[in-house]
Amino acid sequence: MKKKQKMAKVARKTKETEISVQINLDGAGRAEIKTPFGFLNHLLQSFAKHGLFDLKIIAKGDTQVDEHHTIEDIGIVLGQALKKALAKPIAINRFASAIIPMDDALARVALDISDRPYLVYQVSIPKKRQWEFNVNLIEDFFRAFAFNAKITLHIKLEYGKDYHHSLEAIFKALGIALKSALTKNPRLRSFPSTKGKL
């Protein structure tokens, strides 16, 4: 019997943005990311590659007004897609963490597929003369993602001199931790909770 893959497609259109996300949690790390921000595309590609998720994101927004709407809404729709693809988690690990280095940077991510949305974000982005977009908005992306996926997410940048390396390490760590949390545990017969379910 062929295993049913955990997949979802979610689209969201407002007066400010238009976002569509397709995700396959049982993928091979293939990514097609088209947002107005080349660096964000790169970060999301790293997330998909190391999480082994097939991910397609197409995003447009009122970037002439502000970057915030588009970046936050991408987090909203990606979180909704993850929640939808996961559907009814049964015997998954649930908890996972990853500590990932990238040259000068070291990032730590811990998460719980809990149905209890929460974000702890302890990240100080190294300064740069000019960013493609305000990278401090990445916190809003992660908050939108965590609350719409209904996961508990802790992110800490231990250190890092380069903003690119720092953020890429975080996105890689998220992909790796999420992949581990979603992995089926053959020793489990139900969701790992004293309640027996989410």
Image: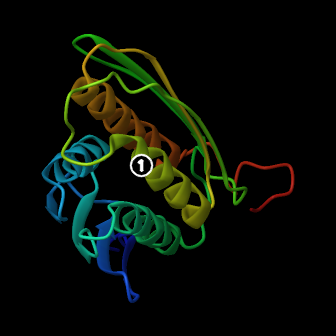
Count neighbours of disc 1 (C-alpha within 10 A) and say few if under 14, some if 14 to 19, many if 20 or more.
some
> Is residue 32 toward the left or the right of residue 158 in the image?
left
> Is residue 69 toward the left or the right of residue 57 in the image?
right
Using the rendered view, name the quadrant where residue 13 is placed.
bottom left
**Residue 31: image x %, image y %?**
16, 58
Using the rendered view, name the quadrant where residue 93 is placed.
top right
> Is residue 102 toward the left or the right of residue 72 in the image?
left
Three-letter code, disc 1? Leu
Q: Specify the color scheme.
A: rainbow
> Between residues 5 and 127, which one lies in front from this camera angle?
127
Q: Secondary structure at mark 1?
A: helix
At horizontal 72% and vertical 48% (from top left) the residue drawn is 192
At horizontal 55% and vertical 46% (from top left) the residue drawn is 186
Answer above or below: position of 108 versus 117: above
> Between residues 32 and 70, which one lies in front from this camera angle?
70
**Residue 106: image x %, image y %?**
37, 16
**Residue 123: image x %, image y %?**
49, 28
> Between residues 194 and 66, which one lies in front from this camera angle?
66
Question: So how many labels did they put on this image?
Answer: 1
Residue most toward the right? 195
**Residue 149: image x %, image y %?**
55, 63
Quadrant location, the C terminus: bottom right
> Between residues 160 and 30, which one lies in front from this camera angle?
160
Answer above or below: position of 57 versus 15: above
Q: What residue sits right under mark 1 in the picture? A: 137
At horizontal 35% and vertical 74% (from top left) the residue drawn is 1
At horizontal 52% and vertical 60% (from top left) the residue drawn is 144
> Is residue 29 toward the left or the right of residue 79 in the image?
left
